[in-house]
Amino acid sequence: MPHWVQVLPQFLLACLILAALPGPATALFLQRSVRDGRAAGLAAVAGNEIGVLGWTLAGGAGLSVLLVANEFMNTAVHIVGALVLIWLGVQAWRGARGDDEFGGTMTALLPAGRTPGSAFRASLISIAANPKAAVFGLTILPQFLPSTGPVLPTVVILALIQLVIDTAWCVGIVLAADRAGDWLRRTGIRQRVERALGAILVALGLGLAADAR
């Protein structure tokens, strides 16, 4: 039996948990879908998944080995990722107090155009610095790889499986946001959603910082 089949149940669970955890990508999908419509939201998903696949392949192909061997680099990746998450969480809380558009403070530094192309570019930039995607590719995926024999085929298969699961989840977020756009634009609802996202991002950042110790 191929190794990837043996680890598939545990790997599917890890993929589902990762997809369900809100992060910078979730905020971006919600903002672009609510503000610019379904096409922009789906374009953001496409950009995000290209980055997810890149992080997963990079981690499985050996970058994770380098980080494990270099304790300083490994710690630096965790700390930088933690600071990004905490910063985004604080921005979400600050934005929830104002009357800005949904997710505006969390995505203020990304391309601001309202076309699907702008959403795609913003998502590519966001995923490049997304610590959640990096952590999965660099620390979680390698745990499911065989200790002997060819590794690359397993990396590719698992990366594609994760891509399908993450894409399905993210598309679901976009479709739900598109249908609930008017409801999410209400000031009180927007503030609650952004505060919840902010709290989750800060908690994830603190957890990632603790792992670096």
Image (cartoon, rainbow, N blue to C red):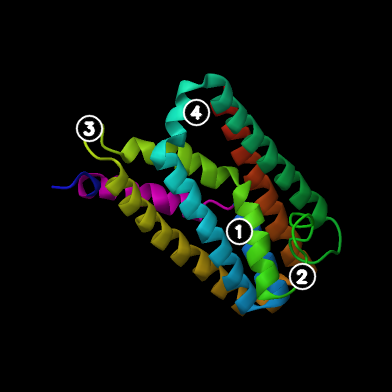
Query: Mark 1 = which residue?
Result: 26
Question: Counting residues from the N terminus, which is met first, the one under dot 4 or under dot 3?
Answer: 4
How far is the residue under mark 1 from the one under mark 4? 27 Å
Q: Main secondary structure of the magenta part?
A: helix
* 62 vs 25, nearest the viewer: 62
Q: Are marks 1 and 2 in contact (CB under 8 Å)?
A: no
* 89 vs 147, nearest the viewer: 147
How far is the residue under mark 4 from the one under mark 3? 20 Å
Amino acid type indicated by mark 4: Leu
Any part of residue 212 in sight = no
Residues shaded magenta: 5-22
* 10 vs 162, nearest the viewer: 162
Q: Residue at x 65, y 53 (%)?
A: 126
Question: Counting residues from the N terminus, which is met first, the one under dot 3 or under dot 1?
Answer: 1
How far is the residue under mark 2 from the one under mark 3? 48 Å
Q: Residue at x 51, y 60 (%)?
A: 49
Any part of residue 171 in sight = yes
Q: Which mark is residue 148?
A: 3
Q: Residues within 10 Å of mark 1 (few under 14, many from 20)?
A: some
Amino acid type indicated by mark 3: Thr
How far is the residue under mark 4 from the one under mark 2? 36 Å
Query: Mark 2 = which residue?
Result: 113
Amino acid type indicated by mark 2: Gly
Question: Counting residues from the N terminus, which is met first, the one under dot 1 or under dot 2?
Answer: 1
x and y percent of residue 114 in the render? 74, 74
Question: Counting residues from the N terminus, which is met first, the one under dot 1 or under dot 4?
Answer: 1
x and y percent of residue 24 in the render? 64, 53
Q: Residues within 10 Å of mark 3 (few under 14, many from 20)?
A: few
Answer with left or right where residue 34 lies relative to residue 171: right
x and y percent of residue 30 in the render? 65, 66
